[in-house]
Structures are given as structure tokens and as C-alpha cells.
Image (cartoon, coloured by chain):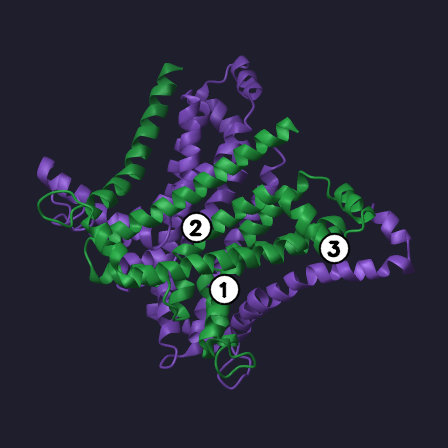
Amino acid sequence: MTERRLWSWLAVALGGLYFLLPLVGMFDFSMRMQRDGYSFEAYRVVLADPQFQQTFGYSVVLALLTIALGILIVVPTAYFVRLRFPGLRPIVEFLTLLPLVIPPIVIVFGYIRIYNTSSVLPLTGSWWGTNLLLLFGYATLSLPYMYRSVDTGLRTIDIGSLTEAAQSLGAGWARILAVVILPNVFVSVLSGAFLTFAIVIGEYVFAALLNVGSFGPYMVWMGGNRAYEPSALAVVAFAITWACMGLIQLFTRFSKFSTVRR
Amino acid sequence: MTTSVASLPAAFRPRQVLSWLGVAPFFLFATLFLILPTLNIVLGAFRNAEGQVTLDNLGKLLAPSIRSAFWISIELSLLTAVLGCLFGFLIAAAITLGGLPRPLRSAILTFSGVASNFAGVPLAFAFIATLGRLGLVTMLLRHWFGINLYGAGFNIVSFLGLALTYLYFQIPLMVLIITPALEGLRREWREAAESLGANGFQYWRLVALPVLWPSLLGTLALLFANAFGAVATAIALTGSSLSIAPIVLFAQIRGDVLNDPHLGYAIAFAMILLTAIANAIYILLRMRAERWVK
């Protein structure tokens, strides 16, 4: 028993070394911009860079829009599939898993071929069209996470009774979805939303191939042209990922707590 | 509930139509932004510029440069999948069966959730800052132990460097998937084996591994697909100096005007094929695994 515990500690310690060293290395490097010791100079330079502010702001807005679009598409679908079309379930599940199976680079390649300037729907021809296409692309990438979290949320509530109760009080479908269903699965929606945010904020391949100046391409450009700033950007990106995952954990725990009380 | 709705005919029909309207946006969206683009690529792989059906594009995949790019990609994905499974399994076993304190267990699981999503550009930067020419570990090894990594032929911009970087999201993914499977191993099975005189090795070989192997093999396939589709990490780390399949496709799409778009289709089609096979193996084996782990 003690021998097994020793080996376990060893495995965890070695794993810890492998996983912590790059984080320490990244943080250490980001602090070494000034020769005479540690400083936050690289962060100051990055945060003051108008390019950073512009691309980062753009990606944040795009991530929020992606989440909104994802909710609009996924919540009604998951709800109606559970309530009215259980037979469609395997098809919908399969479709929502596809973005994990087909590499993103292939999906965006398809976009470029279908929606180019000489096609029926020339989305890549205009600024609005390209941004719209990127938004739809990110919503596609977020489908697996959104659908799974919303569907898990719906499983825990009795949507049949809730719907009947709302209908007997005279509510229509839009009202039922917005006022009854959405608040009940809000925690699940949030965990899908934070995951989506973490994925969209630093996404590179879609943005680069559609020629959109978002945070991902900005980071790659910095990586090729600067020494210390990329590490500062990596620290920022890592902090965002941590924050998103931490918030998911927090909300999930909170929801368990409230379910128990109910 | 469903039957009662179905048995009420005409009066409730509009409601059924409305329900269809509720799922219609999803299907429209999936068709336009998932199915049609993919179908376009797949069909394009079997057509030439004049639109005739042909196998020429797939034949071009056998050109030495493309073939070697796929080969490096497969080797890289396979290596990081196998090592990811191995190390991930050891860590998962340590936290589930190794008698470690519980807070450490949940801390490792939380961290795995973060690390498995910390892929792409920032991850590449973290590894350059650690194992690059001026990286933390490179410098520490030189100053403390007199080991010159780069003098010894190591380079972060290489197959080995890329593999080391990919493991950073592969291992945590394995930990996240295999921990529930390990928790499903019942204590009774071990006690039964021990009461029949089995030692630890025999228990693992004859009881635990036969139960776990569908999960292990399935996760291996998933990790393979996971590494195969990763592009951003590789581009941020190596630029385009290491020719792996997704990077070749990336370059092909960027330079589409000059190059042959149908070769791009063929590369993309081959990538879909490989990841689809890997995912199918994962799903099939997962269904098998769920028979045991409940």
C-alpha cells in the first residue's frame, strides 16, 4: 500500500513538473523584457498596443455574438427534440458531434470554396459577409459543447410538465422558451458559453484563412516579430482559459447546491 | 405525453408545425455551415477542374512531398496518442487508485480541464519560452548542469519539440476520459481476484485490463484524431518549416490562386477520412466499454 502510494506521488510529481514548467517558463520569460531584473514591461507594451486593443476587443465581441447565436440555435432545438421529436435525437447528436470529427481547417476550406466571390452567396466578398461567415463558423465549432451542456441541463428538469403549466397559463412557444426553459437550464447554458468563449477568443485557423484581424492572428504575428510580448500574450490567454473553466466549476457547484436545497 | 399529442389530430396540427419551426433553424444552419462545406470538399476530391469524376486528385496524394507530410502527421499523432494514453493513464491511476489526498485529485482534474483546452497559439509560446533557445529550461540546464540542449541537437521547432508540445493537451484529455473508467473498476473485483490467489500483476492482466481495453483503445483513437486536426499549435511553433498534413493544407488554401485547388480537396478529404475512422473506432469502443463501466 505504501509502495503504491509512493509510485503515485512520483507519477503526480513528474506530471506536475511537465505541466508546471511551461507555465513557469512562459511567466518568467514574459517578465524579462527589461535587462535589469523582472518587470511587467512586456505586459505594459502589449496592453498599450492599439493593435492588441483592437484585435482583442474584436475577438471578445465575436465570442459574445457566437454565444448568443449558439443559444438561439441550440436551446430551441434541444428543447423540441426532447419534447416532440425524440426520434430526431440520434441525427441531431450526430450533427452536433461532427465539428469534433471534421478538422476545423477542412470546414473553413469548404466555406472558402462555397461562399467565395464567384458563388451564389458571396459572403467572403464583403467585410460584413466575412465577419458573418466567421461568426457562423465559430457557432459551428461551439455546437458540440453548447448542445451537450444544454441537453444535459434539460435532462434534469421536467420540461413536459413545465411546458404544460406554461401553456395552461396562456404562454406561447417563444415565451415558454425564453421565460420558462432558458432560466431553468441557465447554468448549463453558461458552462457551454464559457467553453465557447475560451475556444473563440484565441482561435487562429478560421480567422487567418478568412483574413480577419482577430486576436489569434495577432498573437501569431507577434510570435514572429517580437521576443517577450508573445509570452505576455500567452499568460493573458492562459488566464482567460483558467477564468472560463473556473467559472464553469463555480456555477456547476452552485447549481448542485441549489438543486439539493430545492 | 407524446402519444396524447399524436392522438389529438387536426386541432393540434399547428402546434406540430410550430415545433418543426423550432428545429428548422438548426437543420438549416447545420446544412449550410457544416454539411454542404464538407460535402463540397468530399465531392471536389473526386472531380477535376472540368467537373468530371476522376481519381487523379487522390493519386496526387502519393506524390513524395504530400505522402511524407501525411506520414509525419500520422507518426506525430500516433506517438503523442500512445504517450498521451500511457502518461495520462499513469496519472489517472495515481489519483484514483493510489491513495492520494482527495483535494489533490480534484485539483488535477480541474487542471486537466484547463490544460486540455489550452491548445493553439499560446501553448506554442509557452513551450518556446520554456524549451526555446533562450527558454527557461534550456538556460537552467546549461547554467546548473552544463547541459547544452541545442548543442546536443535538440530544437523546439522539430518533430520532437512538436510532440512534447502536443502532449500538453493530449495527456490531460486522457486523464479526463479515463478517470471515470478507472473509478468504475469495482473493489469487489480486486478482492475476488486476490481471494483466488492472484497477485497485483495478474489482477491487472486478467481482470482490470480486459475491462479497460475498449476505453483505452477508444481514447487512443480519439487522441489520434485530436492531434491530427491540430493546426494552430503547429503553425505558431514551427511557422511552416515542418511539413505536416494540416500545414500543407493551410499553405495550399492560402496560395490557392497559384496552386491546384483539387489537390487541396484531396488532402482535406484524406484528413476527414483519417479523423472519421479514428472517431468511429472511438465511438464503437466506447459503446463496448459502457457495458462494463456503469
Chain containing mark 2:
A
**Pick the front one: B281 or B294:** B294
**Pick the front one: B21 or A118:** B21
Question: In the rendered image, which quarter contains the C terminus of chain A?
Answer: top right
* Residue labelled with disc 3: A173
Secondary structure at badge 1 equals helix
Q: Which badge, 1 or 3, comes first in the chain's sequence? A: 1
Disc ID at residue A135: 1
* Marks 2, 1 in one chain: yes
Question: In the rendered image, which quarter contains the N terminus of chain A?
Answer: top left
Rendered purple, the chain in question is B
Secondary structure at badge 2 equals helix
Find the residue positioned furthest to the front.
A169
Q: Would residue A2 be seen by someone viewing this image from the given angle? A: yes
- Where is residue A221 shown, x and y percent of the image? 27, 63
Q: Amino acid at mark 1?
A: Leu
Q: Residue at x 23, y 62 (%)?
A: A224
- Quadrant of the image occupied by residue B31: bottom right
Q: Amino acid at mark 2?
A: Ala
**Pick the front one: A58 or B149:** A58
Q: Amino acid at mark 3?
A: Trp
- Where is residue A153 shown, x and y percent of the image? 63, 42
Chain containing mark 1:
A
- Horizontal side of B91 relative to A24 (left or right) equals right
Crowd tier of the residue under label 2, counting other residues whose Cα lies within 10 Å: few below 14, some 14–19, many 20 or above:
many
Q: Nearer the viewer, mark 3 or mark 2?
A: 3
Disc ID at residue A198: 2
Crowd tier of the residue under label 1, counting other residues whose Cα lies within 10 Å: few below 14, some 14–19, many 20 or above:
many
Marks 1 and 3 sit apart, C-alpha to C-alpha, by 26 Å
- Above or below: residue B147 compared with residue A92: above
Q: Which badge, 3 or 2, comes first in the chain's sequence? A: 3
- Quadrant of the image occupied by residue A162: top right
